[in-house]
Image (spheres, rainbow, N blue to C red):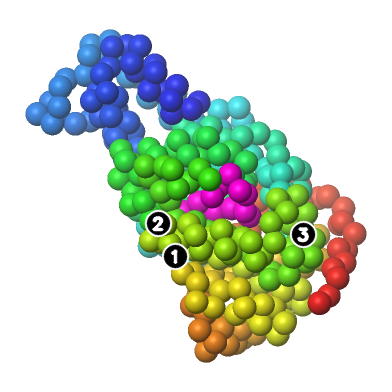
Amino acid sequence: MRIEHLRQRLADLGAKPVHIQRVLRAWTHALPLSAGPARRGPNLPQAVLDALPALTAELDGLARLHSEHPAEDGSARLLVQLPDGQTVESVLLPRDGLCVSSQVGCAVGCVFCMTGRDGLLRQVGSAEIVAQVVLARRQRAVKKVVFMGMGEPAHNMENVIEAIQLLGTEGGIGHKNLVFSTVGDHRVFERLPTLTVKPALALSLHTSRADLRFELLPKAPRISPDELVELGETYARRTGYPIQYQWTLIDGVNDTPEELDGIVRLLAGKYAIMNMIPYNAVPDLPFRRPAWDKAADIARQLHRRGILTKLRNSAGQDVEGGCGQLRARVLGDETRPAEAPVKFVRG
């Protein structure tokens, strides 16, 4: 279901814009759809009131909790079932954050990621995306939503934009607390600046070398790290939000002194934050997580060289926190034979 279809259904029942806004506000805050005293606005039309029980059941069915896996760090990984039985992952993050999925599977095929192993299965509708937030808000406060779960948001642009617009208005989430994460796509830099709700932007960089980036992200648009940073800088200056650059730190692949020099070359003087996340190991893949002391030293070196760097632990390390791992285990994908090792051209 898309949010625009939900709006149209309410309008067909006689709801005016103020009524539609009221129902959507109640839904996004995990309240009964009829919530909101009459003194705050006109009573809902009788036809809308009559339809609310069935509509509530339908909206509740958009995202049902299949299983919950709390972690020691205060996060919780949720396996969420969609109406057709497909599942996606959401993650309750510490400090009132939530990571949501925008696709079942992913077409980018990052070689170190579990989600992309089966390719793209289907898009997640805008109402299904918001339903993940509603499901989470039934458990705890959600004041920040990051589109960093399963899928590439740029490949599901219209649904993701619809969800962002609703969450940033009726959903009551600050615009800079809505984070659109992408490997990079020219459509992102064309569309997002035109929106009423302009989200913050997280760009998956992972390397300063174009050749290695194309190996790590084989189906991503052919945007070089230099061009990606320039596009990001333009968006950052236009919105007033720093770009969050995502760097999955993989032992022996992108944790070299040469890569540190490349990061400094790319980001020196930029309105940017480097989020460095040590790799969350995935069974059967040939990549390894660097030692924490090594990762911490890399972050310190970048700080000393003028790059604002945050060393982050992927949430839910003890509950298969890497994107797609929980879903793969539940579906039994861990029984697959190991894939052949991947070789990279070293700089």
- The reply to whether the C-beta atoms of the residues labelled 2 and 3 are less than 8 Å apart is no
The image quarter in which residue 259 lies? bottom right
Left/right placement of residue 118 relative to residue 166 reads right
Quick check: 199 above or below 27? Answer: below
Residue 285, position as x, y percentages in the image: 79, 61
Residue 290 painted magenta: no
Can you identify the residue that label 3 sits on? 214
Task: Classify mark 2: helix, strand or loop.
Answer: helix
Residue 130, position as x, y percentages in the image: 44, 38
Front residue of this view, candidates 116 and 190: 190
Can you identify the residue that label 1 sits on? 242
- Give the amino acid at mark 3: Phe
The residue depicted at 54 percent of the width and 71 percent of the height is 274
Specify the segment rendered in magenta.
Answer: 179-189
Task: Classify mark 3: helix, strand or loop.
Answer: helix
- Disc 2 or disc 3, which is closer to the eye? 2
